[in-house]
Image: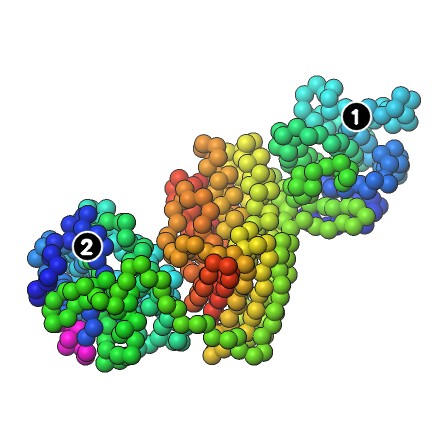
Amino acid sequence: MRAPRTLATLDEVDTGDHVCQVLDRTDHVIDRSRSFVADGALYGDKVVIVGPPLEAGSEFAQLVLDPARLDGSLLAAVRREAANADREGFRSLRVLHHVGPDCRPERTKELLRSELDLEEFAADTGALVVCAYSGADQDPSLLEQIRCVHPHSLGSRPTAPAFQVYRTGKEGWTVNGIVDSEGAVAFGSILCALLAQKATVRLLCHALQFFDAAGMSALADAARHLPDRKVVLEGTNDTVRLTWQLSGFAVPEIPVVMAP
Amino acid sequence: MTSSAPSSNAPGAGYRHELYPYSGRDAFVEGALSFIHDALAGGEAVVVAVPQDKASLLRAEIRDEDAVRYVDTAGVAHHPGRLIGAWQEWLEEYASQGRPVRGIGESPWDEVRSPAEAEELRYHEWLLNKAFARGPAWWLLCPYDIAHDKASLAEMARCHPELRQDGRTMPCADYDPQAPYRFTPLTDPCDPYEEFAYSRGDLPALREKIAACAERHGLTGRRLRELHLAATEVATNSIRHGGGHGVLRTWSEERRLVCEFRDAGYIEDPLVGRRRPDARQVGGRGLWLVHQLCDLVEIRSVPDEGTRVRLHTELPE
């Protein structure tokens, strides 16, 4: 059973983890990659580094997957590598994803989609995925959203975000923590990204501690954002269900089902 | 019964809000029955929202039927902030038929649990004039037993444009449609009280503060979750609209936990949070939920002075 964790060092990662690592200015990409590759060799895992090409002659050049030169999606590429790893007798696949800065407005949507794909991939295949973001170069609100779709956090001061959405089982997404006005935009964006891929999204809310009106508005907006979609929330407490009803959202035109 | 006002309550006639001071049960029945009979004679429907014992008196004379509906007020009678939404809902069925409607509404004045609740019930009467000013026409009669409390009659009169006396409807001289509501000043917090200053990022800490206080008074589970939700909505308003920060005070008085939020904002619309939101509405649900989830809500907002919101939650025995 995957459970969210905050990790002090890379030594604590395990198969199936999907880790968000926010790098300090002092962290060097080559150093991080070197220790990641060494750990892979130690545990008998195949290693892939996703990111821009490293300097010519780099010791890791043959391990790099450049997203700009992929034939197909990143998800398809890592799935292919996971199948290769299995065939080649490796224990598992380790993916180190270096995410560079990008100011395009559509970047948030693309990254969320990509991270949700990687989360599903890690949960389904048992691959270890570490996504390394440079804290200084990224928009803080983007980083906050990205942290929410990683069940695991790593960094010099790792803290869990207010809420997390992560893959559970074959069909579900666990939502834990607090979805209030400060996280409602991120929650809505994540839901829209999930609903863009699947007609029915199942959210497991047993560990959802708090869900306020802003969070519920984000849920309602996301559910009716695209036609013929449905969001099923399981494990909601009676306060969440009462608030949903009181807010006027329990109507047929908002395709949300709230279950205990 | 005769009335100086037209007995027709046709759409377009506007909202009519009439105070009926009476003394004793017989006078209550006589006035209410006369109002119902007039309505039925004009083809109008009547919604009766009165305490159970009063409803029983009327039911003995006129049974529940298509045109006369006795509604259950148990969930709203002691929660003044919920009453406008309740009237919206009670009237909806008839309004959708395009049928003129009258209402009889009496609060359980002899069972009011605190002076704060009585004040909020009177304020609700005043707000009704604004809430239904632009809606479909309907006519609400508010019986008020002066045998129970004659002292507050003048305050009630200031909330009603019309007055029923000796079987006749007349303009209420004490009512001034332009005058603001005259609030009784809020009581001072009971000692000992606790304070917590909050701003962006402090909502989890604010909830922890409230939980610690609530749990000391035995408030846990569903009721605590509801208070957390209400408190978060109010504090979020402070952060978004009230200058970015506020101060929470908590104390207990007379078996109630009181959470007071103060900020620098001003709530211009006195009806905010009183009307039921619809699914398409963008925002505006926070204070509605607060009224629905708390036992009593007091809001005082003055330009240049700021806003104080008090949430009252009854404590378990």
Total label count? 2
Q: Secondary structure at mark 2?
A: strand
Mark 2 is surrounded, within 10 Å at the Cα level, by few (under 14), some (14 to 19) or many (20 or more) other residues, namely many
Residue B235 lies, with reference to residue A164, above or below; the image says: below
Q: Which residue is found at the position 33% from the left and 76% from the top?
A: B111
Nearer to the camera, B150 or A210: B150
Q: Is B244 or B73 nearer to us in this picture?
A: B244
User: Is disc 1 placed on a helix, strand or loop?
Assistant: loop
Q: Is residue A130 visible?
A: no
Residue A46 lies in quadrant:
top right
Whether residue A250 appears in magenta in the rendering, the answer is no
**Dominant secondary-structure state across the stretch colored magenta:** helix
Give the numbered dot on residue A52.
Answer: 1
Range of residues picked out in magenta: B23-30
Crowding at dot 1, Cα within 10 Å, few <14 / some 14-19 / many 20+, comes out as some
- In this orientation, does residue B198 appear? yes
Q: Position of residue B205 (x, y in %)?
A: 64, 61
How far apart in space, not on screen, are marks 1 and 2 (Cα)?
72 Å
In the image shown, does A187 or A258 lie closer to the viewer?
A187
**Res A179 label:** none
Query: Which residue: 18% across, 48% down?
Result: B11
**Chain at numbered mark 2:** B
**Residue that mark 2 sits on:** B101
Q: Amino acid at mark 1?
A: Pro
**Up-down: is B150 above or below A31?**
below
